[in-house]
Every structure is written in C-alpha cells, then in structure tokens.
C-alpha cells in the first residue's frame, strides 16, 4: 500500500522553512530527517513521530498513539498515531 501523499504534503509544508531537513523514502513510506535522524514520517495512512525517552511513556497513554512496530521489533522512543488522529489534527 502506498503512503498518504496528502499527509506527507502537510508535513512538507510544515517543515519547508526548517534547516537540515531531508526527505527520504523508507519502510514503504516517507521519512523526514533532521540532521540525518528520523524526525517524522508517513507510513500508509499513519503519522510516525520520533519521541525522546522523556515523552515516550506519556504519549503511549493517548488512545491514538501506538508503539511503532511494522517489523515485529518495536522501535523504542518511536510511536505512531492512527489514521483517525492524523485526520482530526488537520486544519
């Protein structure tokens, strides 16, 4: 399945004036890297957000946030929100 181009476009717009951002196709979606490190991305219809350890546990308490796991090996300090959450945050 392809990734949500409309969600990726919203991210591009939000990051357009930021320095050191690189867009890279990865994991069947697209990632936006800051200084070579994953910052945010899109996988299918989901927004992927890299969180630091200080925010990780609190974020997982939100109903629309899940651990980032597309391979069977969850990525610690990473999470992703559902399609529903990404639609409701649009403005």
Image: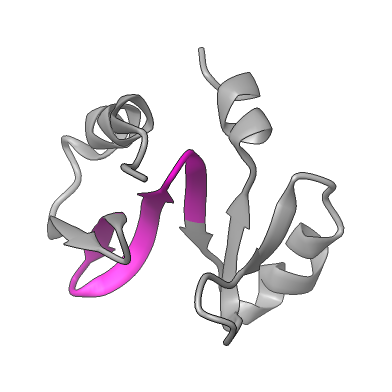
Q: Quadrant of the N terminus?
A: top left
Q: Residue furthest front?
A: 1
Task: Identify which residue is drawn at 57% across, 32% down.
Answer: 86
Residue that appears at 58% across and 72% down: 69
Q: In which quarter of the view is residue 64 placed? A: top right
Q: Is residue 60 above or below residue 84?
A: below
Q: Position of residue 75 (x, y in %)?
A: 55, 81
- Number of numbered tags placed on the structure image: 0
Q: Residue at x 68, y 75 (%)?
A: 54
By secondary structure, the bulk of the magenta-drawn segment is best described as strand
How far across and how far down the image is residue 42, in percent? 39, 48
Image location of residue 8, percent across then percent down:
30, 36
Indicate whether 91 appears above or below 49: above
Please state the extent of the stretch shown in magenta in the rendering. 30-48
> Foreground residue, 81 or 16?
81
Q: Is residue 43 above or below residue 26?
A: above
Residue 20 pos. (x, y %): 13, 60
Q: Is residue 38 magenta?
A: yes
Coloring basis for residues:
one colour
The residue at the far top in this view is 91
Q: Residue lying furthest bottom in this view?
A: 73
Q: Residue at x 70, y 71 (%)?
A: 56
């Amino acid at each position: 399945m392809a990734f949500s181009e409309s969600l990726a476009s919203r991210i591009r717009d939000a990051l357009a004036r930021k320095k050191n951002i690189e867009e890279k196709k990865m994991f069947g979606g697209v990632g936006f890297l800051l200084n070579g490190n994953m910052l945010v991305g899109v996988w299918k219809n989901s927004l992927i957000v890299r969180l630091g350890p200080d925010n990780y546990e609190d974020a997982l308490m939100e109903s629309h946030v899940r651990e980032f796991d597309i391979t069977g090996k969850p990525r610690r300090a990473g999470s992703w929100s559902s399609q529903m959450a990404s639609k409701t945050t649009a403005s």
